[in-house]
Image (cartoon, rainbow, N blue to C red):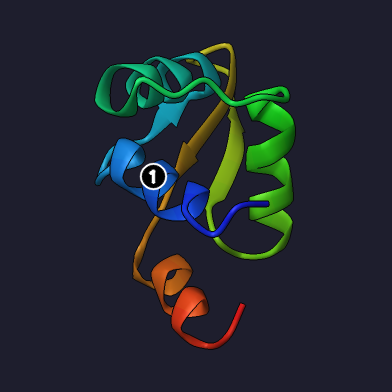
Amino acid sequence: MGDDLVPMIWESLGDDRLTTREASERLDHLFNYRCPDDLAKTLTKLRSEGLVKGQISMDRGGWIWWVDDECRSKRGSGQ
């Protein structure tokens, strides 16, 4: 995964909790970037590495994603 993708995802998520679709739309709007593979797969991989957080939201009908200080601190620890 490209080193520049994680900061782009973090910036697109900001302080919000977004669905996969909303995150994809923000990436496209802010950076004119569409994830070459399925964004859900990328976010799931980042979640397993602790670089984003995610959970199922019954209210929003799918996964929601966010980033917090704990996630951001992982990047500085050499991951």
The quarter holding residue 51 reads bottom right
Would you say 45 lies left or right of 20 here?
Answer: right
Given the current orientation, which residue lies at the most extreme bottom position? 77
Disc 1 residue type (three-letter) = Met
Would you say 32 lies left or right of 36 here?
Answer: left
**Helix, strand or loop for disc 1:** helix
Would you say 14 lies left or right of 67 here?
Answer: left
Residue located 68% across and 51% down the image: 1
Nearer to me, 67 or 76: 76
**Count of marks, rendered view:** 1
Q: On screen, 24 above or below 12?
A: above
Residue located 43% across and 42% down the image: 9
Percent across and percent down for residue 38 are 71, 22
Percent across and percent down for residue 60 are 49, 14
Q: On screen, 49 above or below 67?
A: below
Residue located 45% across and 83% down the image: 76
Percent across and percent down for residue 24 are 47, 20
Q: On screen, 4 above or below 8?
A: below
Answer few, some or many: residues within 10 Å of disc 1's Cα (few below 14, many 20 plus, some between 14 and 19). some
The quarter holding residue 43 reads top right
Percent across and percent down for residue 55 are 60, 39
Disc 1: which residue: 8
Which quadrant would the C terminus be assigned to in this image? bottom right
Nearer to me, 74 or 57: 74
Nearer to me, 59 or 74: 74
Nearer to me, 18 or 51: 51
